[in-house]
Amino acid sequence: MFQKQTYLERRAVLQQKVGKGLILLFGNEESPMNYTDNAYRFRQDSTFLYYFGISRPGLVGIIDIDEDREVVFGDEYTVEDYVWRGPQPTIQEQAAQVGIEQVHPIHQLTALLGHAKSSQRPIHFLPLYRAANKIMLQEWTGITPREIASRYSLDLVKAVISQREYKSEEEIADLNRAVDVSVDMHIAAMKCAKPGMTEAQVTAEVHRVALAAGGDISFAIIATIDGQTLHKHSHANTIQAGDLFLVDAGFETPMAYAGDLSSTFPVSPKFSTVQKEIYQLTLDSHQAAIDALGLGIPFKNAHLAACRTIFDGLKAMGFTKGNTEDAVEAGAHALFFPCGTGHMMGLDVHDMEDLGEIWIGYEGKPKSTQFGLKSLRLAKPLEIGHVFTIEPGIYFIPELIDLWRSQNKFNEFIHWDKVNSYRDFGGIRNEEDFVMTENGAQLLGKPKPKTIEEVEAIRAEADS
C-alpha cells in the first residue's frame, strides 16, 4: 500500500468529479481453476486497488457522495480460514490503513443498494469483466449482465481514467522497479536459451526471476520461435541453432504495477546476415517512433512514423514498392506490421482497457476499422504522467501472405515473390516502457539490451 493520504485524496477527487449518487466499486473474488479450493492466483481489480488499496478477495467498496461516507463491505475470515491461510489482518485493520472507518459484512450491501435504488439515487458502476461480479450486480440491483454495457456509468469511467492515467511520483517509482525486474527477466532468457532446450524451459527461467524478485508476471509469458504469431502462449517447440527467439514478458510488483518488455535474439551466438538486416530495421522503426514522441503530440504520430520506417526499409530490401505515404494510408504495411506501436501501462499491463479502449486511448473518438490500424490501442496526445510502451515489429505471417496474395491485394505496393521467399522467417519485436515528462519521453527502468552488438555479446557469453 501507499500512504493513507494517497487513498484519501484519490477518493476525494473521485467524489468531486462524479458529483452525486453512490459509487459502487467491485473488488475481485477468487476464481476456481477446476474446483472451488484450487484457484488461480488471486489478482485484485486494479481500480479497486487504486482507490482502496486492499488486495484481498471478496470486497466491495462504496463511496456515498451525497452522505459523504466511504464503506468497505466484506466478510472476515473464520478460524477455519486461519487453519489453511495462517493469521491474517482483519478487513477493519486493512481498511484503517487506507482511511476507511466503516466496514460491514457483505450481506448488508443488499439493503444499502436497495434503498439507493428506491430513492432513485444514481448508482455508478464500471463495466464489469468478471462473471461473478456481474451476477452479484444483478442480485443487488436487478441489472442483468446483458444490460451492463448500456447501463454502466460513463461519468464514472471518465472520472477514473482522468485520475489513473496520470502516474504520480510514487507510482513511477514502482513502475521503474517493475521494469528493472522485467529487464532481468529478458536477460535471463538471453543467457539461458540453448539449442535443444524447449521453449518451456526458457519460459520457466523467465518466470523464476519474477518470483524470486518477490512479485509475479504481469501477463502470460510469450517465449517462442514462432515470433510471427503475435501472442503465442504455448511453449512446446524445441529450439535450434538458427532460430530467432522472441520473448514478451513483464514483472508485476507486490503493489501490482506492471512492466512490459519484448526482446528478440538468435538461438545461435550471432544473428545471420538475413536476421541482422530485418532486426536492424525493427530497431530503426523503434527509434523513429521514439523520435516522434512529444508532449501534446498524438501517440498515433509515433505509430505512423514506425509504419513509414518499416515500409521504406523493406522497400530498400526489395519487399515493397511505390509511394510510402500512399502505402501506409492504404494499410499495405500491415502485411508486416499488423498491430499497434504501443499502449498505456500502469496497474494493468494494458492500462484501464477494461474501461473501454476508445476512452483510455482515443478520448471517446472512434477507432479506425482498417486492418492493422484498428489494433492501435493508443492514439491520443500524450501528457505529463502518461506511461506507455513502444513496440513496433516486423512479422512474416504465412497465412496472411497467402490470403492477401490470393486476393491480389496491394499488388501495387508488394513484391509478392520476394515476400514469399521469407515466409518462414518468423517475427521480431523489441519493446520498451516510457513516461511522458515536461522534458519529453523518459525511459522507465534500466536499459534493456537491444542493439545487435549488445544482444550478440550476451549470446556469446551464454554459448561459452
Image: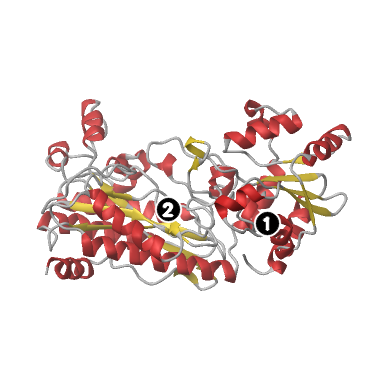
Q: Is residue 12 visible?
A: yes
- In the rendered view of the protein, which quadrant contains the C terminus? bottom left
- Amino acid bearing label 2: Gly
> Residue 168, percent across and down?
60, 67
> Residue 73, percent across and down?
74, 47
Give the label, 1 or 2, closer to the camera: 1
Query: Which residue is rendered at x = 54% and y = 50% of the image?
Result: 43
Question: Label 2 neighbourhood size at 10 Å, few (<14), some (14-19), many (20+)?
Answer: many
Question: Label 1 neighbourhood size at 10 Å, few (<14), some (14-19), many (20+)?
Answer: many
| The one of 52 and 440 positioned closer to us in this rendering | 52
| The one of 40 and 377 positioned closer to us in this rendering | 40
**Residue 92 is drawn in which quadrant?**
bottom right
Q: Is 24 rendered above or below residue 450? A: above
Residue at the spot of label 2: 342
Query: Which residue is rendered at x = 34% and y = 53% of the image?
Result: 248
- In the rendered view of the protein, which quadrant contains the N terminus? bottom right
- Amino acid bearing label 1: Tyr
Q: Is residue 312 visible?
A: no
Is 157 left, or right, of 375 in this rendering? right
Mark closer to the chain start, 1 or 2: 1
- Give the structural element (helix, strand or loop) at label 2: loop
Q: Which mark is residue 372?
A: none
Residue at the spot of label 1: 51
> Residue 398, percent across and down?
21, 36
